[in-house]
Image (spheres, rainbow, N blue to C red):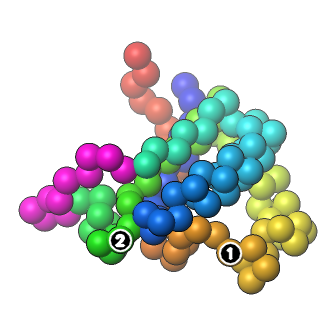
Amino acid sequence: MPYIDGFVIAVPTANKAWFVDHSAATDALFKEFGASRVVECWGDDVPDGKVTDFRKAVQAKDDETVVFSWIEWPDKATRDAGMARFHERAQTDSSFDIEQNPVPFDGARMIFGGFSAVVEL
C-alpha cells in the first residue's frame, strides 16, 4: 500500500501563478527522490463548516484560497528516504533560503501529516 503525505495551506488568491510555478519546481524534487505522484489542488468548492472546516484549519483570510495537496510514495521506507534527501537539499541549496526566495504562502499555517493507506480501490 502507498504512503501519503498530505498538506493543507492557505495561499493568497493573487499568488496562484506563483504557487503553481513554485510547486512545479518543488514537486519535481519529490518525484526525483522517489514519489510516485504529487497532486496540488486549488480550492474550488470549500464550504464553511459549523464547527470546523478547511478554511478555519489554516486560518484562511478572505483573499486566500485553500490548497489541498498530497505526495504519494510507493511505501513509507521510500518516503522516509525521499524526505530525508529533500530536507538535506533544503539545508545545502541556497534556493531554499526563504529570505532570498520567499514562498507564495504562509508556511506557519500549513497543516501536514503522513498517512498509511488502509483502503485502496
* Residue at x 57% of width, y 56% of height: 17
Q: Earlier in the sequence, mark 2 or mark 1?
A: 2
Kindly identify which residue carries mark 2.
63
Name the quarter where the N terminus is drawn.
Answer: top right
The spot of residue 66 in percent (x, y) is 38, 58
Residue 98, horizontal then vertical, whole percent? 72, 77
- Asked which quadrant contains residue 61, the reply is bottom left
Give 94 or 73, whichever is nearer the viewer. Answer: 94
Pointer 1: what residue?
Answer: 102
Q: Is residue 10 left or right of residue 28?
A: left
Q: In which quadrant of the rendered view does residue 103 lie?
A: bottom right
State yes or no: residue 65 in magenta: no
Q: Position of residue 32 (x, y in %)?
A: 81, 39
Local SS, label 2:
loop
Question: Which residues are the magenta region?
Answer: 43-52
- Looking at the rendered image, the disc whose residue lies closer to the viewer, 2 or 1, is 2
How would you classify the magenta stretch by its main secondary structure?
A: loop
